[in-house]
Image (spheres, rainbow, N blue to C red):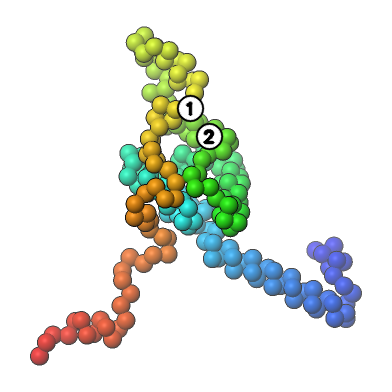
Amino acid sequence: MKSFFKILPERGSNWRQIALFFIAVIIGLGLFMMKEARVTSYLSDDPQACVNCHVMTPVYNSWMNSSHREWANCNDCHVPHDNFVNKYYFKAKDGLYHASVFTARAEPDVIKMKEASQEVVQQNCIRCHVQQVTQVKYDGWIEDHKEKRTGRQCWSCHKQVPHGKIYGLNSIKYNLAPIPTDQEEMVIPDWLAEQTTKKPQ
């Protein structure tokens, strides 16, 4: 902390007050942006946290209509599960990358996983479906089963699991998803509620 104050101009200087003011403004703006971006929502496993960015709406909608919806949320597939630290490190790394891309409006029309994400998803496919992947009995009647199950990614065959075959911001008609800030009930002003509940005389 002492080294921080060494950076500031000397006590009694007008520049010191100006520097402290701008530091306070930067910290305040940072906290405000964290609140507006709902940063704490990303600590949860709630899939609605993924649609804080509208870019993820088609992905969320396709997952909502998939067989995986009942069994897996976003983090079950897209985050490593080998240990707690790695899970949140990966979430933070991926989240900061996504935030910077979306803030700069540099997102592609079709979102594709990077290599690190592909490895994580592949490991999680195997983690959940280990019985199907490791059954030796299939070797006898499925040609090249061992090579196919270990030598390529699961989605090279299972292309539509769980996000379907349609990708991109413009690909889903009526592309709406629940926003975490949406209220479940309509907000009706009191005066209008009174008018609608009055019995005719």
Q: Residue at horizontal 27%, vertical 83%? A: 192
Query: Which quadrant does the C terminus fall into?
Result: bottom left
The answer to which quarter of the image holds residue 196 is bottom left
CA gap between label 2 and label 1 equals: 8 Å
On screen, 149 above or below 84?
Answer: above
**First in sequence: mark 2 vs mark 1:** 2
**Residue 137 screen position, x and y as percent:** 36, 13
Q: Residue at horizontal 61%, vertical 46%? A: 93
Asked whether the residues under the numbered discs 2 and 1 touch, taking CB atoms below 8 Å apart as contact, a structural biologist would say yes
Q: Amino acid at mark 2?
A: Gln
Give the camera-side residue of 185 and 82: 185
**Residue 101 circle label:** none
**Residue 167 screen position, x and y as percent:** 42, 43
**Residue 158 screen position, x and y as percent:** 39, 30
Query: Which quadrant does the N terminus fall into?
Result: bottom right
Secondary structure, mark 2, is helix
Secondary structure, mark 1, is loop
| Residue at image mark 1 | 153
| Residue at image mark 2 | 118
